[in-house]
Image: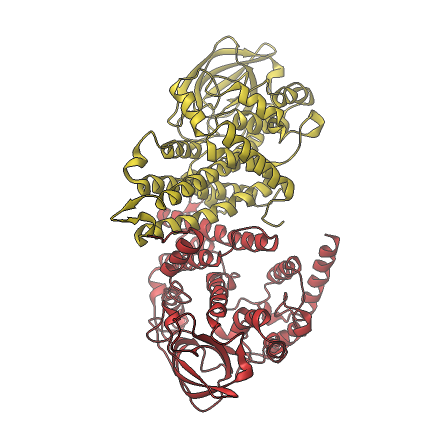
Chain colours: A yellow, B red
Amino acid sequence: MALVLNEEQQMLKESAKGFLQETAPVEALRKLRDERDPMGYSRELWEQMAEMGWSGILVDEAYGGLAFGHVGMGQVMEENGRTLTASPLFSTAILGVSLISLAGSDAQKSALLPAIIEGKLVTALAIESGSRHRPAYTGVQASSSGEGYRLSGEKQFVIDGHVAGKLIVSARTSGAEGDQDGISLFLVDAGTAGLEIERVIMADSINSAIVRFKDVEVGADACLGPVDQGFAPLQQVLDIGNVHLAAELLGIAQEVFERTVQYMKERRQYGALIGSYQGLQHRAAHLFSEIELAKSVVIKALQALDEGSDDLRLLVSLAKAKVGEVATLATNEAVQLHGGIGMTDELEIGFFMKRARVAEQVFGDQRFHQGRFAALQGY
Amino acid sequence: MADLETFRTETRAWLEANCPPSQRLPAEDFEDTCWGGTKWRFTNPEQKQWLEVMAERGWTAPEWPTEYGGGGLSREEAKILNQEMARIGARAPLFSMGLSMIGPALLKYGSEEQKRQHIPNIVAGKIWWCQGYSEPNYGSDLAGLQTRAEDKGDHYLINGQKVWTSYANLADWMFCLVRTDPDAAKHAGISLVLFDMNQPGVTVKPIRLISGKSPFCETFLDNVRAEKDQLVGEVNKGWELASYLLTHEREMIGNMGQSTAIVKSLHEQAVEQVGLENGVLADSSLRTDITRWAMDDMAFQLTAERIGDESKAGQGTGAASSMLKYAGTENNKRRHELLLGIYGSQALAWEGEAFKDGQMASQWLRTKGNSIEGGTSEIQLNIISKRILGLGEK
């Protein structure tokens, strides 16, 4: 498979770019932040995205989706990285759709996927028990209760947790924390008794929440997939999520890099454009080289998600770790090369730096994925 | 796509039938990969046989046109051929500057006569080409070169000195940058000429490097003759060709780590030398360093593939060879530093049978030149800054 976009994917990328830059540039995120918007995103914007079909890019045609694939969705995410647009695209159209599609029964898929496509249902994945990514530690115990289950415990870093209609929760039904067996997935409605959701405003101003379960009762039909066997589909969805985060981070890296190079062609010191100084040129050129590497690992991982690959997990961790590293470098260099103005809130560079760090933390940072990359190869 | 699958099946069967056993072993020494030419001594009859059967199909130059002896394969077919060769560990049947540099330049800029004279011999490995570029006072600043070629009617008379000429002692012909107009601006008076090395006036002196023996030579040119019909392209327009050739050279050097790709991976060697503790490499810092290198290496290989695919699809920014040369050579240096970390004092032994006569230390030292030859890393960063990023204006 050639490492290039086909015509349809290219068209989706162009239209996503046009739409996001016109409708929801960084200025829109600044406004949500400054006005302390209670939703943290614009519902109207999400409806427009749904109308364009973005909420159904990964949904099977049988449930009314476009089944356009990960390479296509990855282009939307990359463009989203350039504008930092706040929306449930990641939480719902990527994570929710993928997990429901992989683990859900036909009844669950028929009930939930069309609602997601229409933009009416937002989902949030509640999987982190602490502040560092450890998916086999659930932090929530689920015990049998009547026909169903009773959930107790706490989740952190739940993206879109406070605006979701349904949470998808990993909980321990057997075994000990750290075991991959014995983890089950549950669908929990936002209004369920005993559920406490506390919005957390992260550095990037994008939605997150702490979710507490105090004897939350759910029916047997709340199980997403077989009991005790939730880790495998969860792992697959984490892989999917990580590749799309890498695509978003690639968009961030490219955007700050282009803005920085542009600034180097405008800013004068000592009577010359700062871009004429070799000390700065080489830093920019090195960053260019790193971004070229990042582009390749992202498209390879996206294609592997669509086509399957024996090396899928390796390619996922490669993409997340490498692009995490490159986005960190790109945002750091962007501030340094802008100088004092780069430190100001007025310039948008800071927004990119903050989002890059948060996006990198979601589902494991570069060190986590370096470790996984090594472990997958037996060392 | 069905055609490609047929091509794969047929290629696999043909390689199984035709690639001799010894040519499926990893190439460890210089002699293990054939460079061709009149002075080449085949290490065994199978190396000769492998070159001949591959050359007969044009598969030493898979993508070159069949009319000059090339394989005439599409990029996709050539990729498959590569994959199928890698599958059985087949060595490249031929490695040469003819294939990687002057051949592509002649196909693009050469006259019909030049193509007919030189290309089939390159495909068949009959002539060994060397490159006359750098001079003692003109390295990074190559365009300042001073080797003079005087127009003598039917030929040019060449006087000057070249340096870093790889295998000048074994080569049959040289492609050489010369100054044909000393009064023109420095980029405007350069030409590219071809000449036979087997003539009076060509003196070759090998250069010893920090890594020991080396392929590099100084080449002295005293009243050397190049026929007029061996001028490539137009007179005084040689800098364009030189740039084109440098692009090929950058790609070749950037890819050097790959040509010996069949050796064990770094992490496998590390596990053998250092061992595991609870399933994890016993030296955790080394584990991290190897992982970061392996990720950069994979990303680099994928980037070389992507840039090739993009140019085939008419996409991409072009001018990527500087990036590949920069990233590839810096990675290769890191790889050899890590090998020192993995093998410890063993890697630094300089003499003795047990240590293959210091091969590891010598290879490590040799990689230091990768980011110098073919344009230093800093020159590549300059090129990226100016040509791709458009920086430089004051």
On screen, residue B390 versus residue B2, left or right, reads: left
Measured along the vertical axis of the image, is residue B255 above or below residue B177? Answer: above
Towards the viewer: B218 or B362: B218
Towards the viewer: B178 or B196: B178
Residue extending furthest toward the bottom: B200
Residue A98 image point, x, y percent: 59, 29
Q: Quadrant of residue A115?
A: top right
How many numbered marks are there? 0
Residue extending furthest toward the left: A270
Towards the viewer: B180 or A365: B180
Measured along the vertical axis of the image, is residue B345 above or below residue A342? Answer: below
On screen, residue A162 versus residue B49, left or right, reads: left
The residue located at (45%, 82%) in the rendering is B169
Residue A290 image point, x, y percent: 43, 48
Q: Quadrant of residue B165?
A: bottom left
Towards the viewer: B350 or B90: B90
The residue located at (40%, 67%) in the rendering is B373
Report whether residue B73 is seen. Answer: yes
The residue located at (37%, 27%) in the rendering is A203
Residue B101 image point, x, y percent: 52, 70
Residue B97 image point, x, y percent: 51, 72
Measured along the vertical axis of the image, is residue B249 above or below residue A50? Answer: below
Report whether residue A226 is seen. Answer: no
